[in-house]
Image: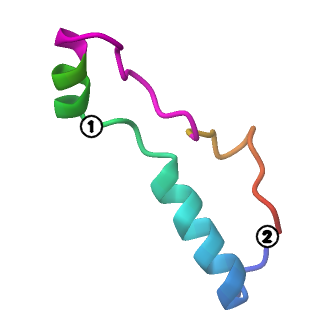
Amino acid sequence: MARNKPLGKKKRLIRAGKLAEAVPIWVYAKTRIGGRVFRFHAKRRHWRRGRIKP
């Protein structure tokens, strides 16, 4: 990938990076007690396996 990226692609990469973060521990701890367990992020992706739209 080029070192200099267009602004649109940069913004998409930043957003994808934020979405790829894990669920905070406090959310898991709070939802584990009652009902449905919210354990992992549905939109989590790996940098090498999951591609984002160009």
Label 2 belongs to which residue? 1
Residue 9 image point, x, y percent: 71, 78
Q: How many marks?
A: 2
Apparent side of residue 28 relative to residue 29 in the rendered image (left or right):
right
Q: Earlier in the sequence, mark 1 or mark 2?
A: 2
Circle 1: is it few (<14), some (14-19), or many (20+) Cα within 10 Å? few
The reply to whether discs 1 and 2 touch (Cβ–Cβ < 8 Å) is: no
For the C terminus, give its image quadrant.
Answer: bottom right
Amino acid type of the residue tagged 1 in the rendering: Pro
Q: Is residue 46 magenta?
A: no
Q: Is residue 3 above or below residue 47?
A: below
Residue 7 in percent (x, y) is at: 66, 89
Main secondary structure along the magenta-highlighted residues: loop
Q: Residue at x 55, y 33 (%)?
A: 42
Query: Residue 41 lies in magenta, yes or no?
Result: yes
Tell me: residue 38, above or below residue 47. Answer: above
* Label 1: which secondary element: loop
- 24 on left or right of 18: left
Q: Quadrant of residue 25?
A: top left
Span of residues in magenta? 32-43
What whole-number distance in Å separates the C-alpha atoms at marks 1 and 2? 31 Å
Residue 35 locus on image (x, y percent): 29, 10
Can you tell which quarter of the image residue 43 is in?
Answer: top right
Dot 2, how many residues are within 10 Å of its Cα: few (below 14), some (14-19), or many (20+)?
few
- Measuring 40% from the left and 37% from the top, which residue is drawn there? 22
Amino acid marked by disc 2: Met
Q: How is the image coloured?
A: rainbow
Q: Name the residue rendered at 21%, 11% in the picture.
A: 34
Location of mark 1 (residue): 24
- Tell me the quadrant of the picture where the N terminus can be found: bottom right
